[in-house]
């Protein structure tokens, strides 16, 4: 699985968009970008994933650059409940479930 | 759907005691796993199962046993608790194959303290 780099922390004002970057310059053609988050004391929560096209679901949008070397997770209207550690994970979907490896992630703090 | 449930939420043990952490899911997922998370650290895989009757070791299996007699349940047994096993334990599940295999659902965790 390709290595990812995320800023250790970010702040965002409540109601504004939160843009969380992830660098994955060594990503391979068959590797997907996954985002999970962990709210304090809770289990990790799947947010979104993508291969090369931008993706959107009810929680967030994922923007992947054309060269796939970086991506941005966008929470369009951040709330206090979005305060969490956000993890960017790059891995090839082998077709079989296996261990997730979480790095250190980005601590997002949404400020009132 | 209740998703992934874990019991108990909190547990305090004395060194040498044994106990079982329960995990259940109602999504008919083939894959289930147990992680532990120590303070300020990432998640480490203890054991996993790709289906009923099949289990395998993860990164840190020593001191733990698992079994998978049904698709729904995946209990984790601590054989003889040690203070080093003080941690938060998370159970996770997902579809075993296909594009959804890497979308894993986690339970709320069990906070275990061993004195």
Image (cartoon, coloured by chain):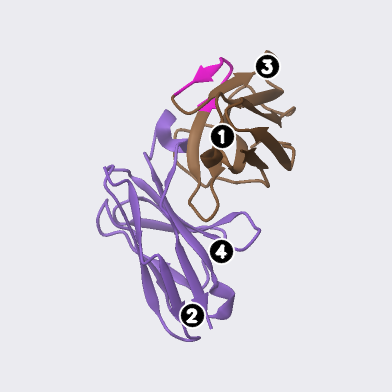
Chain colours: A brown, B purple
Question: Few, some or many C-alpha atoms within 10 Å of disc 1 (few <14, some 14-19, many ≥20)?
Answer: many
Q: Distance between the Cα atoms at labels 2 and 1?
A: 34 Å
The residue under the point 67% across, 20% down is A68
**Percent position (x, y) of residue B44?**
57, 57
Q: Is residue A106 above or below residue A42?
A: above
For label 2, the residue is B81
Q: Quadrant of residue B97?
A: top left
Q: Distance between the Cα atoms at labels 2 and 3?
A: 48 Å
Q: Distance between the Cα atoms at labels 3 and 1?
A: 15 Å
Q: Which of pointers 2 and 4 lies earlier in the amino acid sequence? A: 4
- Label 3's element? loop
* Farthest-out residue, front: A112
Q: Nearer the viewer, mark 2 or mark 1?
A: 1
For label 1, the residue is A35
Residue A2 in view in this figure = no
Question: Few, some or many C-alpha atoms within 10 Å of disc 3 (few <14, some 14-19, many ≥20)?
Answer: few
Drawn side of residue B60 relative to residue A59, left or right = right
Q: Nearer the viewer, mark 1 or mark 4?
A: 1
Number of labels in the image equals 4
Drawn side of residue B96 relative to residue A28, left or right = left
Q: Chain of mark 2?
A: B
For label 3, the residue is A65
Q: Is residue A56 magenta?
A: yes
- In the image, which residues are magenta? A49-57
For label 4, the residue is B60
Q: Is residue B56 above or below residue A70?
A: below
State if disc 1 and disc 3 touch (CB < 8 Å).
no
Check chain identity for marks 2 and 4: say if they share one. Answer: yes
State if disc 1 and disc 2 touch (CB < 8 Å).
no
Q: Distance between the Cα atoms at labels 1 and 4?
A: 24 Å
């Amino acid at each position: 699985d390709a290595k990812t780099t995320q800023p250790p922390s970010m702040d965002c004002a409540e109601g504004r968009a939160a843009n969380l970057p992830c660098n994955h310059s060594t990503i391979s053609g068959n590797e997907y970008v996954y985002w999970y988050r962990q709210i304090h004391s809770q289990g990790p929560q799947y947010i979104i994933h993508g291969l090369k096209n931008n993706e959107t679901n009810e929680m967030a949008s994922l923007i992947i650059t054309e060269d796939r070397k970086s991506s941005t997770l966008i929470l369009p209207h951040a709330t206090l409940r979005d305060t969490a550690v956000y993890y960017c994970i790059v891995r090839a979907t082998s077709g079989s479930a296996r261990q997730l490896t979480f790095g250190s992630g980005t601590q997002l703090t949404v400020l009132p | 759907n209740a998703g992934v449930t874990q019991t108990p939420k909190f547990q305090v043990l004395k060194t040498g005691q044994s106990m079982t952490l329960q995990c259940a899911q109602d999504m008919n997922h083939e894959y289930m796993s147990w992680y532990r998370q120590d303070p300020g650290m990432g998640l480490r895989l203890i054991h996993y199962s790709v289906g009923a009757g099949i289990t395998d070791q993860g990164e840190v299996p020593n001191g733990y046993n698992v079994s998978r007699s049904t698709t729904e349940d995946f209990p984790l047994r601590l054989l003889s608790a040690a203070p080093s096993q003080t941690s938060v334990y998370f159970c996770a599940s997902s579809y075993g194959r296909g594009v959804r295999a890497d979308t894993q659902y986690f339970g709320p965790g069990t906070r275990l303290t061993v004195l």
